Image (cartoon, grey):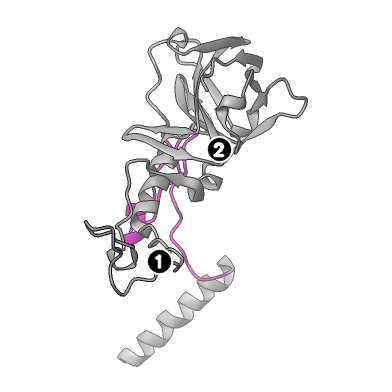
Amino acid sequence: MRWSTLVALFAAATALISLHSGGPLRAQAPATAPGQAPATAAGKDASIVIETKGFPPRAAPTDYPAHAQAGAFTIAADFTGHNVGTQEGFLTSEDFVVVEAGVFGPPEGRLVLSVDDFSLRVNGGKKTLPAEPYGLVAKSLKDPDFERPEDKESKTIMTGTGQKTPGVDPNAPPAALPPIPIELRRAWEQRARRDSLPIGDRVLPQAGLLFFRYGGATKGIRSLELIYSGPAGKATLSLPHHP
């Protein structure tokens, strides 16, 4: 049998299999176990995908400033204001306030976690603030230790005699600050993503960050309550806060 005939037969067989399967043959992704993040595809993008792992839980619920029972489970929390406490240090967000939450249960207990189960009541208001996905916080993240490089050519520099530098217009508007490098912003976002409260079916204890949209100054907060309403039941925690 000629080689061209073999090639033709192979092509026909492949087309027939594709027709019965409803499309081209594709490798199937491995199944994801409950509570486990989906596997990432191999390639250059895999290195920038970070699983939401949360914080290492504290030793016990009593190690948090506030805790309350929800059925057989315990919800614990620590309010950090506009500080986003990641494992490498604090970031900040002017648009969101943050709660570090811990969820504890009986030995080998499991619970389905969701940010939708948490809300925040500020100053006893009837309307509560829902917990927001970490992705909405990303654009507002800042590192308080980060300093933009100064544009020396656009600054008005005073000499020792009080005279301004020749050639510099004292009435000119300040030059726009250079943008924050995208790599740095991505690193801040990855820190917030990794340390946010894990979601899905999880073995307890679990802990992580919850984000609530609140742009006001924390000194205006007189009372603060974290509300949980989820598969474990209901709980309301009165959170200590500092202006």
Q: Is 111 placed above or below 33 here?
A: above
Is residue 113 among what the camera can see?
Answer: yes
Q: Which mark is residue 96?
A: 2
- Which callout, 1 or 2, points to the residue nearer the camera? 1
In the image, what residue type sits under mark 2? Phe
Specify the amino acid type for callout 1: Pro
**Splitting the image into 4 quarters, where does residue 54 fall?**
top left
Q: Which residue is mark 1?
A: 170
Q: Is 200 or 173 nearer to us in this picture?
A: 173
Q: Is residue 236 left or right of residue 24?
A: right
Q: Relative to 85, is 88 on the left or the right?
A: left
Instruction: Give x and y (percent) for residue 115.
Output: 59, 33
* Secondary element at tag 2: strand
Q: Which residues are magenta?
A: 23-52
**At which x and y percent is residue 101?**
50, 23
Across and down, in percent, residue 92 comes to: 44, 38
